[in-house]
Each structure stands twice: as C-alpha cells, then as structure tokens.
Image (cartoon, rainbow, N blue to C red):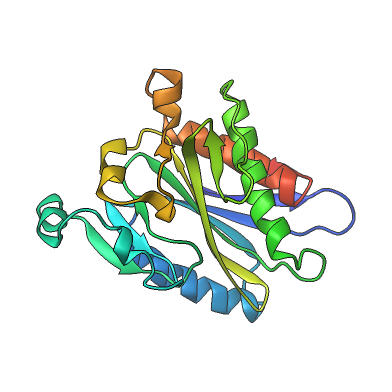
Amino acid sequence: MGQEGRLEEAGTATRPLDVRRLGRIAYPDALALQRSLVDQRRAGAIGDTLLLVEHPAVLTLGVRGDGGRAHILATPESLASLGIGVFETGRGGDITYHGPGQLVGYPIVDLSPDRRDVHRYVRDLETVLIRTAADYGIAAGRIEGLTGVWVGNDKLAAIGVRIARWVTSHGFAMNVTTNLDHFGLIVPCGIAGRGVTSLARLLGRPIETAEVENRIIEHFANVFYLNSLAI
C-alpha cells in the first residue's frame, strides 16, 4: 500500500484506520487537507484516518483570546528573516512551533458512539506519546493542569485538538530532532517557566523520524482500537 497503511480492529466489530505518511508538507496545505477529510469523515465517505507529517518552520495560533500572539517574543522582522510564518489554526491551546524534525499527527477520527469524551481523548493521545517515549527508555509523563507530555520540567510533545460534532482534527506534535532554539521565539503553549526537549536531546543521538512513526502507529492502534497492524 506504499506509504499508506491500514489498521483493523480485532474482534467481530472491525473498524479500520487509514494511516497516511505524507512527509514534509506546508502547514496551510495540511490545514486544508484536514478540513476536507473532516467533511468526508462526517459524511461517511471515508473511515478514521491518521495523518503523519512534518512541517517547514511555522508558528501556529490557538483559538483562545488572541490565539497566543502576545506570546510571540520575536519581531516580525526576525521571523521573516528566518522564513517562519504565523498561521491561525482553529484548534484549542495557545501558540506553538512546528518545524523540521518534529513529528506531527493529525487524527481524523469519529469519536461516536463510545468515545464522546474530550478529556478522555486528550488523555489517550498523551498515553500514545508516553508509551512511544518509553520505547526509548524515556520516563515521560503528565503534569497536572497542563496538556502534553513532559520529561521533568520540559515538554517533549504538545497537544492541541479540535472536535466538531465528535469528529477530531489537529492533534499532537512530538519533538524528535527538532531545532529547539526556535522555541525561544515564543512562550511555548503560553506556559512560562518551563522548557522543551526532544528525543534526540534526551537520547544524546540522532533518531530517524520514520522509526518513531512506526512506534506511534503501533501505540495509537493499541490505545484507540486494540487491534493488529497490517501494512
């Protein structure tokens, strides 16, 4: 199936998940694709889908207040010199950074009928990422009152979702070999006093994003579908 895989739920009630590994894609293109897929999922034209992508360097804004513009520390001129754009997203959360070396996942999933719980959905995404980190011997976890996945005081993965009529979009971003200096352009997720980290920094060595993708797919399947993987 090339770069697309299909996960199928074990047992009699089979619910497939199409996995699309899209590589590096511009943020506006990914946003437009998500919106199209959400419409198709809501209409029943497609099944549940997980997009795995990487973006060129970009800052993205949430929907609360000013979306996080007040947490941009760099000047417009500095951002322009780095080729970093700023985009509104329609997701929850505050400002965040996406860039090369960061694995971004966009689940387009219908939470009906038995997963219609926003809190549970976010916790399930965190579980996927915590288990992925554990595969590398990293003890990641949660911090009460905050979203995302943390190692000590540093955020390893961010989560910002949109759920409309129980169909999800947006999702998670895990730092694999990300240029962490770019997080200094903002107050990440609007949370002052905490840092960011990456798998590469924690392991002290480079790591292939495709390898991390495979582990995330496996854990996503287990957490959301309790199924086997067939590529």
Question: Camera-side residue: 206 or 125?
Answer: 125
Image coordinates of residue 154 in percent, x first then y, are 46, 35
Quarter location, residue 182: top left
Q: Is residue 208 visible?
A: yes
Q: Is residue 231 visible?
A: no
Going 43% across and 67% down the picture, which residue do you hit? Answer: 62
In the displayed orientation, state which residue is furthest to the top. 204
Image coordinates of residue 75 in percent, x first then y, are 15, 58
Image coordinates of residue 22 in percent, x first then y, are 42, 52
Going 56% across and 74% down the picture, which residue do you hit? Answer: 38
Q: Quadrant of the C terminus?
A: top right
Going 76% across and 71% down the picture, which residue do you hit? Answer: 112
Quarter location, residue 199: top left
Q: Judge from the rendering whether residue 88 lies leftward or rightward of residue 228; answer left or right.
A: left
Question: Camera-side residue: 39 or 200?
Answer: 200
Going 55% across and 63% down the picture, which residue do you hit? Answer: 161
Q: Please tell me whether residue 92 is drawn above or below residue 73 in the rendered image.
A: below
Q: Judge from the rendering whether residue 204 lies leftward or rightward of residue 92; answer left or right.
A: left
Image coordinates of residue 216 in percent, x first then y, are 58, 40
In the displayed orientation, state which residue is furthest to the bottom. 43
